[in-house]
């Protein structure tokens, strides 16, 4: 997979992570839409989804930065 593909996948994961951080209750509703009626997520679930969403923002961002640095270093002949 080339750098562009890696960056696009990483960007998609970042968007998903932002969604998870901003709307953890929606994530719960999407996951349990057919399982429950009128139930609500626990505070533990909401906190866990926010932590996972944050990780899904940070890790792909690092991957994108490393990919860009690799391209720059290769362009100047250092990589």
Image (tube, rainbow, N blue to C red):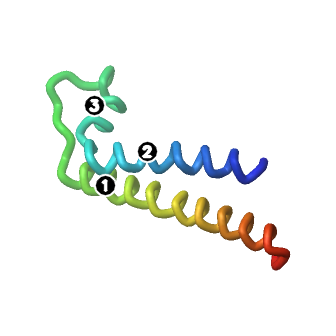
Residue reaching furthest bottom? Answer: 78
Q: In this picture, is 13 found above or below 59?
A: above
Q: Earlier in the sequence, mark 2 or mark 3?
A: 2
Answer few, some or many: residues within 10 Å of disc 3's Cα (few below 14, many 20 plus, some between 14 and 19). Answer: some
Place residue 25 in its image quadrant: top left
Task: Pick the residue in front: 15 or 50.
Answer: 15
Q: Position of residue 8 (x, y in %)?
A: 61, 45
Q: What residue would you read off at disc 1?
A: 50
Q: In this picture, is 35 found above or below 11?
A: above
Q: In this picture, is 29 found above or below 22?
A: above
Residue drawn 81% across the image and 69% down it: 74
Q: CA distance from mark 1 to mark 3?
A: 15 Å
Q: Position of residue 49 (x, y in %)?
A: 33, 51
Task: Pick the residue in front: 66 or 17.
Answer: 66
Contact (CB < 8 A) between labels 2 and 1?
A: no
Q: CA distance from mark 2 to mark 3?
A: 18 Å
Left or right of 50, for residue 9: right
Residue reaching furthest front? Answer: 76
Quarter of the picture holding the C terminus: bottom right
Viewer-side label of 2, 1 = 2
**Mark drawn on residue 29:** 3
Residue drawn 69% across the image and 45% down it: 5
SS of the residue at dot 1?
helix
SS of the residue at dot 2?
helix
Q: Earlier in the sequence, mark 2 or mark 1?
A: 2
Q: CA distance from mark 2 to mark 1?
A: 13 Å
Q: What residue would you read off at disc 2?
A: 15
Contact (CB < 8 A) between labels 1 and 3?
A: no
Left or right of 59, for residue 21: left
Task: Pick the residue in front: 9 or 32.
Answer: 9
Q: In this picture, is 45 found above or below 35?
A: below
């Amino acid at each position: 997979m080339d750098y562009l593909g890696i960056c696009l996948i990483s960007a998609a994961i970042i968007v998903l992570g932002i969604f998870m951080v901003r709307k953890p209750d929606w994530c719960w509703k999407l996951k349990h839409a057919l399982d429950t009626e009128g139930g609500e997520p626990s505070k533990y679930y909401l906190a866990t989804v926010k932590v996972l969403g944050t990780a899904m923002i940070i890790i792909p961002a690092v991957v994108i930065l490393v990919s860009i640095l690799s391209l720059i270093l290769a362009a100047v002949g250092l990589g």
